[in-house]
Amino acid sequence: MKRFVLAIAIVAGLPLAARPAAIPAAASLEAEIRAAAALAGEPHIVSATGVTRDESPILTLENPDAFDRASAKRRLVIVGGPDATQNVTALVRWFKTRAPRSLRLRWTTSALPSARFEPDDTQSLTRWLTFQAPDLVVTVGHDPVRAPMAATPLPEREAEDALLKLMADAPAPSPLHKVMLDRVARTPLEIATMLGRRYPEMPGISYIPALSWSSRLKLAALLNDPAIRPRVEGELEPWLRRDASLFGERIQLTAVAGTLIFGDLAATDERAATARRLFDEGVSQAAAEKAPGVPAHGQGWTDDMFMASAVLARSGVRPGHAADLDAAAHLLIAYAARLQQPGGLFHHAENGPAAWGRGNGFAAFGFIETLTRMPASHPSYAKLLDIYRRHMAAVRAAQAPDGSWRQILDAPGAYREETATAMLTTAMARGVRLGWIDRSYVPSIQRGWRALAAHITEDGGVVDVCSGTGAGPTKRYYYDRPAVSGGDDRGGAMALVAALEMHELGNIWKTGPH
């Protein structure tokens, strides 16, 4: 992508027809941004990318079409220096109201009015620019990526003319825009097949490789590929032979969740007896409690809602094991009573007061794992379904403009995170497929899938996966959690689960809900 720098300084005292007097207050600058968004046309969504030291969001003006292959428009992104909010919004107003109609038909716009990032925040701007999929990036006032530039003050008309020329001369589409469109053009099954060949890269008894193994077993059936199952079994051989311990000296719930793969193998595998014994060890540990509704090996986090229920729900469908399904339901209801907020989102923990993205993904996975296996006649079914539906409604409202979900769901300045996007897209897609929620969720699911696909590279790498995270006492803790990009078993597993769920959802248009 060729980057252009437009050094524009529209200074006080110049005749700006649509601009009020100087507005120094942050609240007034936000009002100016929102006023520009309210004008007809794009960009119309006020969002954010990054936060200041005091956790104020760094606001953006966005359109929702970054990953929309149906849109033929070229993409302009305007980035303002720290004091350029009014200059940038003036250009946005011009584009939406006075730019030639032919230009508005060919281009769409996003803007970062004031790139006032902290000196140690080296990622927020690059993240945002990359996933705006721009054909042209114009900086106003100075280039916030490099050193400030000397800018010759330009009257508004000259600034508009300069921008017109840059847009006329820009190549289209940019290589970056094309990369994003190519990523989202891949089918869910194509992405699942690619991810299934790569993950897990580090086999072990944990929920992360177990989700990849479980998905690969489904992939074997979909592709009618007899070679996939032996590869899964080969990676599990140390445990199937009992050469390796399931849990080690200290049992962790993440490892207990890893035994879900033995439950899947026990259903059909020729070594079912061995797999069943290993699975029973996991069920025993998942059912153990240190307090009512708190798993013995859990932390009281939303993570527990998936880690325990994934094993208990699988066990609960076996003859004579109905109590395990009851235990899964009891755990989910107890955790929701403590952690689900009135609006529907989940705090990560009682001592982790933030709607952590993957934490909400864990809660959602707990519900879909259990509801998928629970008959509608079960005494807890209606309660679980109500909690799930309230959660999904809140999740839909928290979706970012490009379709992704954030590291903190209800904090617009938090980075847009891969596992939250994968898990919440999965949970919604399963809900539509099985009739728990209605088809009004389909646009959100489609947008979530496109955003996820854009974060999966051509070799199966993933972009912006929050690293392993315990409960933190403040939102700042979650804002600052590092993100991993490249080969990552956690992000790969969650994307693989989502890809297969999207493939199944696509089938309902042919066969009807089931």
Image: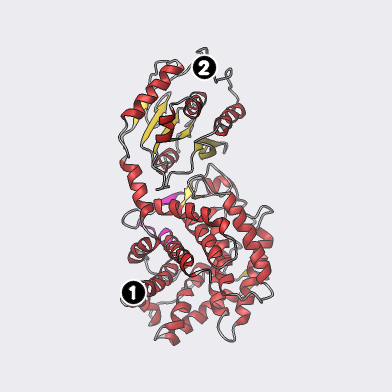
- Please tell me whether residue 486 belongs to the stretch shown in magenta: yes
Q: Quadrant of residue 205?
A: bottom left
Q: Nearer the viewer, residue 131 or 439?
A: 439
What is the magenta range? Answer: 482-492
- Please tell me whether residue 59 belongs to the stretch shown in magenta: no
Tag 1: amino acid: Ile
Q: Quadrant of residue 456?
A: bottom left
Please name the residue that numbered disc 2 is placed on. Answer: 16
Tag 2: amino acid: Leu
Q: Quadrant of residue 139?
A: top left
On the image, the x and y values in percent for residue 320 come to 59, 86
**Image quarter in which the N terminus is found:** top left
Q: In this figure, which colouring scheme has been used for the structure?
A: secondary structure
Please name the residue that numbered disc 1 is placed on. Answer: 228
Real-space Cα separation, disc 2 to disc 1, in angstroms: 65 Å
Q: Is residue 352 visible?
A: no
On the image, the x and y values in percent for residue 354 come to 60, 50
Left or right: residue 443 compared with residue 343: left
| Sequence-wise first label, 2 or 1 | 2
On the image, the x and y values in percent for residue 105 come to 42, 35
In this picture, is 191 found above or below 480?
Answer: below
Residue at 61% x, 53% y is: 394
Q: Nearer the viewer, mark 2 or mark 1?
A: 2
Q: Which mark is residue 455?
A: none
Residue at 33% x, 45% y is: 178
In this picture, is 402 found above or below 211?
Answer: above
Residue at 43% x, 72% y is: 214
On the image, the x and y values in percent for residue 73 come to 40, 39
Q: What secondary structure is found at the residue carrying circle 2?
A: loop
**Mark 2, other Cα within 10 Å: few <14 / some 14–19 / many ≥20:** some
